[in-house]
Amino acid sequence: MPALTYVGFYAELVPDDTAPHHGSLREALSPPGDYPPEPVAAYLEAGHPVLDLTEGTRDVIGDAFHVPGGVSVLTDGTFVWRLDLAAYVRHYTPALPGPLLTRALASPAAASPLSRDALLAITGRVVADLGFRTG
């Protein structure tokens, strides 16, 4: 399986220091990204579901939004992100990896198709990487 790149798992969104995270949201906003937010947010929302979770999230920067199921995890097969990343993109345009922006702007709202086997492999990897217990 190709390497997965985690995006939007910011330290500020994790309830405790023991949970895995990747970078800081405040750092990703200083300076903010330079991209049109709407097509990037649409691409993020169109990702393939990896983990559907019901826990809602609130904006930790300015309390501007609430995302039902915000901790859910999506993918395009290369990048993995939380559902609430799309809301942060719309409101704050955090800096994101260039290759993700290239994909999102080339085909907004259309993640590449993935086979069932590929999604199952990605799910297993994400569950392990994010420290979810199994069994």
Image (cartoon, rainbow, N blue to C red):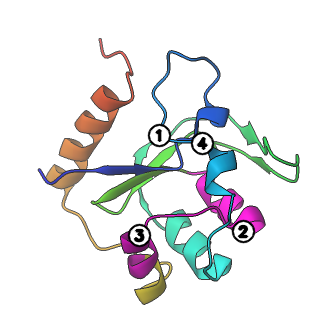
Which comes sooner in the sequence, label 3 or label 2?
2
Disc 1 from disc 4: Cα separation: 7 Å
The residue beneath circle 3 is 100
The residue beneath circle 2 is 90
Residue 14 appears at what percent x and percent y?
A: 61, 28
Give yes or no for residue 65 being in the magenta stretch.
no
- Toward which corner of the image does residue 133 lie, by quadrant? top left
Q: Is residue 12 left or right of residue 18?
A: right
Which comes sooner in the sequence, label 1 or label 2?
1
Magenta stretch in the rendered image = 83-103
Disc 1 from disc 2: Cα separation: 20 Å
Instruction: Kindly identify the residue that appears in the image at 88 percent across and 46 percent down.
Output: 63
Nearest to the observer: residue 127 or residue 21: 21
Instruction: Kindly identify the residue that appears in the image at 27 percent across and 71 percent down.
Output: 113
Nearest to the observer: residue 110 or residue 89: 89
Disc 4 from disc 2: Cα separation: 18 Å
The residue beneath circle 1 is 22
Disc 3 from disc 4: Cα separation: 18 Å
Amino acid marked by disc 3: Leu
